[in-house]
Image: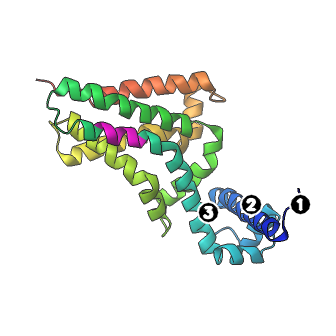
Amino acid sequence: MTIPAARAAVSRGDQTRESLLAAATTAFARDGYHAVSTRQIADLAQANQALIGYHFGGKEGLYVAVVERVAAQIGAHTGPLLERIEAALDETREVTNPAALRDRLLPTLLELTDGMAALLLRDDSAEWMQLILREQQTPTAAFDSLYSGFMGRVAALITEVAGRLRVDQDQTANRVLAATIMGQLVVFRSSHAGVMRHLGWVEIDDARVAYVQQILRGNVTALLAPPQA
């Protein structure tokens, strides 16, 4: 079947745009925004430099598009898990029995930590996670896309679950608790070399992912344990 010329042009344009986004993700993650030129990105994508302006309006627009793309990809992965937490929170608004509340809320949160651990421990997360870590340390205008795209939602839901299960703590304490849970997930990327050296691991296979998930489950369960009488 012959593809109409206009349709073929659109397809080529989409492919070029994706190639530029992929190349820019690699370059920005490796060297940072200011150290990378549009020429370097175009060369890496094997594309005409002028197409960066055509598709994105320039380097800044390309960077924002890269961050939005990363946020969307992570959001697509975590979205169903977060929806299950939201559903569990809604279904338990009138539940006052602490044990029943825990039995409903904790498993959904552990599903989230399992899913995020599996995502962050994969080798192909290294590149975009490096980009996110750069934004954490030196945020740009694009940081809002990351925070509104998935980060803020994850933090808010973990905090809400903590608030429902740890009624002995105030809101600030539960926010800190949520941050410590997220930190246990991120550390495998933010301190990857040190963690791997400490563990004596060269790679992380499925069995090791499962082992890390098991440890995280124990940690989260302990952090959200009922207050001692």
Q: Is residue 71 left or right of residue 31?
A: left
Q: Nearer the viewer, residue 2 or 39?
A: 2
Q: Are marks 1 and 2 in contact (CB under 8 Å)?
A: no
> Badge 2: how crowded within 10 Å, few (<14), some, or many (20+)?
some
Q: Which residue is mark 2?
A: 19
Classify residue 107 as left or right of residue 197.
left
Foreground disc of the pair 1, 2: 1
Whichever of labels 1 and 2 marks the residue nearer the N terminus, that label is 1
Instruction: State which quadrant residue 221 falls in.
Output: top left
Camera-side mark, 3 or 2 = 2
Q: Is residue 98 above or below residue 52?
A: above
Q: Which residue is mark 3?
A: 32
Region rendered in magenta: 82-88
Task: Report, in whole angstroms, how far the alpha carbon at label 3 lies from the one at label 1.
Answer: 43 Å
Q: Residue furthest left?
A: 229
The residue where tag 1 is placed is: 2
Q: CA distance from mark 1 to mark 2?
A: 24 Å
Locate residue 187, reporting x and y percent: 48, 40
- Give coordinates of residue 49: x percent, y percent: 78, 74
